[in-house]
Image (cartoon, coloured by chain):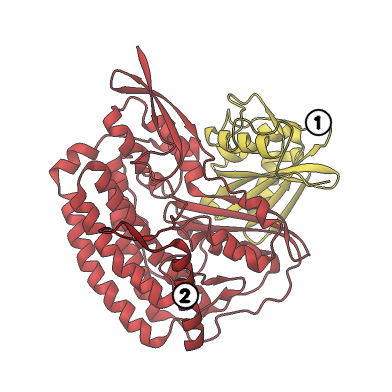
Amino acid sequence: MSERGEGLRQGLGERILKLRELGSRIYIEALSRDIKEVVRYIFQDLGARFITVSGMEKEKDFELIYHFAWDREGRVISVRVRLDKDNLEIETISEIIKGAEFIEREIYELLGIAFKGHPNLRPLLGMENWREGFYPLRRNK
Amino acid sequence: MKSLIPIGPFHPLQEEPELFLLELEGETVVGIDIQLGYNHRGIEKLAEFKSYEQITFLVERICGICSNSHPLAYVQAVEEIIGCEVPRRALYIRAVIAELERIHSHLLWLGLAGHFLGYNTVWMWAWKYREPVLEVLELLTGNRNHYAMMKIGGVRRDIERKNVEKVLKVLKDLEGKLRELSQAILDDPVLHLRLKGIGVLSKEDIREYGALGPTARASGVEIDVRKNHPYSVYNEVEWRMITQESGDVFGKVVVRCLECFESVKIIQQCLEKMPAGEIDALVKEIPAGEGIGQVEAPRGEVFHYVCSDGSNQPIRHKIRAPSYMNIPTCRVSVQGAKLADAVLILAGIDPCYCCTERLGVVDYRSKEWVMSGEDLVRLSQAKTERIKREI
């Protein structure tokens, strides 16, 4: 593991379930309940820049990946968390990063994941009369 | 008493459908609500149903202005999954096209900013000097926009030796014209009065909102994917990152003006240094895995995340365009501004006009359609056929 990976492991301790390095990419797995602390460490302590969050429905669960650009070190840190299908809820990070408000609203709208504590959790892109409970980015059954 | 003024979703000064709902006290803006989505085309979802080759064309159509940045970020993400090495010559060609795109995009914005100000001379000038850049792009790629140059593992077209001379000549002329234009803009006392001190974003604002590109660099934040996460050949050519400390609209004008010169420098070096050789790694299969592509588009970082399960279609393709991060900064920058400045501040981030309009030709005397949209499509197809035969 590189020096940077080692540093991250020390900084985040047991909050890291898994850490994988691929060239200039660092993929971390964490528990969804730890997301705020992990994000706070990466954004505030490391000084990484928030890129975006990508969400995906997998076979058994949903996953969210929080991407950060660690510009100083030329690395991208991607934090992966998993959410159970019967509990699609996670704490918002928009209190720490205002720039995350839009993407959380988008994920709420397109994947149906609720962000607890979001100041303004309403749909971002679709029409006002969009069908309730219809999430375009989920897999069709 | 508070009043609400909507700018958009369809507004003569905002050529992109988007709603900025301004809350005013007298002439002063005290609040803003931003509504997006009028242009949402579900591209991320569409990408899950297309093959990897087709997606290059799909993402090219996200934006008419950044029509090289998106495919470039996408192919880089897929190349990361494959782990393939792109031929050196292809990397140089990618940088040439990307920088030509930056020049034409910055000039487009400069022109529009002039137009918003009521300074139409700047508009006419900037767009006049943008024209040769588009002609160069047509010469190199076959199209003024939507160049279709990027390909997983390389580029689709080589830059022929006979064209290099032509491009260098256009760039030389352009540099002189750009110098005149930027001096005229940057020395104009009226523009100083109009643009300085409005729409100021601090370094903290940039960080909190994750703002990017010239918007961030005008506030003194040194971020540029080309320097921080070098791709293509940006770490092999000489250029400097342009920053300003003021954070206002004037700072953004300065950054964009000066960046054009850096782009000219990069293209000149690339054309001189470009090694001979292959331009395509001839990729066959895409294994399971995930990859990230980052590209510094004219407006800031374009980010693509692609997740593959080993089939010929991705299972997830996340796209983050720079304006997505830049637009929310308006919540800070228009706060306390006068209504007359608000439009300019909103335009200051260069929100991306991601729809290219269709056009028709009408005889203005008889008011009859000379050519319809279909005729133009036929014309374009005939041209493609002709070019195919010539190649």
What amino acid is labelled 1 in the image?
Asn
Image quadrant assignment for residue A123: top right
Residue B155 visible? The answer is yes
Q: Residue furthest top?
A: B1
Badge 1 is on which residue? A87
In depth, the one of B217 and B53 nearer the eye is B53
In depth, the one of B304 and B126 nearer the eye is B126
Residue at 51% over, 51% down = A72
Q: Residue furthest left?
A: B189
Q: Could you tell whether B217 is left or right of A42 in the image?
A: left
The chain identifier of the residue carrying mark 2 reads B
Q: CA distance from mark 1 to mark 2?
A: 48 Å
Residue at 45% over, 67% down = B375
| Chain A shade | yellow
What amino acid is labelled 2 in the image?
Ile
x, y percentage for residue B214? 38, 49
